[in-house]
Image (cartoon, rainbow, N blue to C red):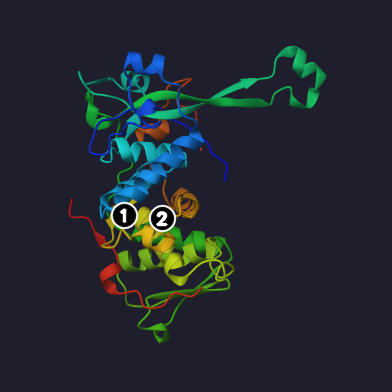
Amino acid sequence: MEYQSNNSSTGNSAFTVSNSAASGIASNTASDSTNRKPATAQQLVRENVQYLIEQLEAGKSEALTAFLDAMAHFRNYSFGNVLLIARQKPQATNVAGMWTWNQLGRRVKRGEKGIAILAPLVAKARKDEAKSNSENDNTPSLLGFRRVYVWDESQTEGARLPELDKVTGEASVYLDRLREYVNAQGITLEYNESIAPALGMAFGNTIRLLPGQTDAETFTTLVHELSHLMLKHAERRTATTKTVRETEAEAIAFVVGKAIGLTTSTASADYISLYHGNAALLTESLEAVQQTSAVILAAITVEKSVSQEVAAPAAEAAPEPKRVRRSRAQTATTEAA
């Protein structure tokens, strides 16, 4: 899958990057920047996925929860940068570069460390090169990535931020938009009591839901079933297990629900038990979860975060089946906060 990077960051929390190549991007000291060669985007993805595997194998499922939370908050960021933000500052909700915060009338608090991420280095072909290949006159080239820093809103102080469309935790308006999106994809949505005790199922171009669920439950179930179709789980039945397919769909339901103010009780499914520590398969699965969640959220939301709206000029360029028996304990509830 194509790797794109879009923002800048560095951080300090329970997930601060350790002494590995990843620490070269997490540290913002002068000596570090001169003595260490920045890790490549691919290296950082591998190392952070390995870190996630180690945390899960040690029984620390909060690492996966932090990553899924970051997916919900930073859906326009690349997979690698979401991993970096979640590991360095899992509580982050709105991040931006120092220039952006200054433009908004806010300042980074004294002593706060930035969250290190990767931003793309893009350049156009030189004039002599462009003449030899006129087709690429205006085609930018990706030269690589460089370390940049962003700070979370909680690390800043100053003027109040502009009012953004706020998530209320009410599922009804998002459920209407989700239904519209489903219909626009040519998917038939039906309600049928005969599917009980299943809350929903998906097959072909049809999704069936159990009637009588709350709006929040219906929303979460519909996202889950839509995910099966978007991930082509019916076609992947021979390449994946039912447990993997269900876990991927449930993770997407968690990310999308979290982004609109809902939460589910089973966010931290243990991926390692599914992939037996296989980092390549885990990475592929999590990238599929992120990309599918981002597509659904783009279709049903209009609100923007600070980090999506304003970016520091050079540093923050835009990056990047059938389901049966799902217990009501796994359905969505409105967040207390």
Q: Which residue is mark 1?
A: 57
Question: What residue is rendered at 20% in x and 20% in y?
Answer: 111
Q: Is residue 257 above or below residue 315?
A: below
Question: What residue is rendered at 61% in x and 20% in y?
Answer: 123
All told, the count of numbered labels is 2
Q: Is residue 201 above or below residue 271?
A: below
- Residues tagged 2 and 1 counted as in contact (Cβ below 8 A): yes
Q: Is residue 323 visible?
A: yes
289 relative to 106 in the view: left or right: right
Question: What residue is rendered at 68% in x and 26% in y?
Answer: 139
What is the crowding at mark 1: few (fewer than 14 residues within 10 Å), some, or many (at least 20)? some
Q: Is residue 76 visible?
A: no
**Corner quadrant of residue 200:** bottom left
Please name whichever residue, 121 or 55, is drawn nearer the observer in this view of the structure.
55
Assign a secondary structure to mark 2.
loop
Q: Is residue 187 above or below residue 108?
A: below
Q: Position of residue 179 (x, y in %)?
A: 46, 63
Q: Position of residue 204 (x, y in %)?
A: 58, 73
Please name whichever residue, 61 or 216, is drawn nearer the observer in this view of the structure.
61
What is the crowding at mark 2: few (fewer than 14 residues within 10 Å), some, or many (at least 20)? some
Q: Position of residue 334 (x, y in %)?
A: 24, 59
Whichever of callouts 2 and 1 sits on the residue coming sooner in the sequence is 1
Q: Amino acid at mark 2?
A: Gly
**Corner quadrant of residue 252:** bottom left
Q: Which residue is mark 2?
A: 277
Q: Is residue 284 above or below residue 329?
A: above
Q: CA distance from mark 2 to mark 1?
A: 8 Å
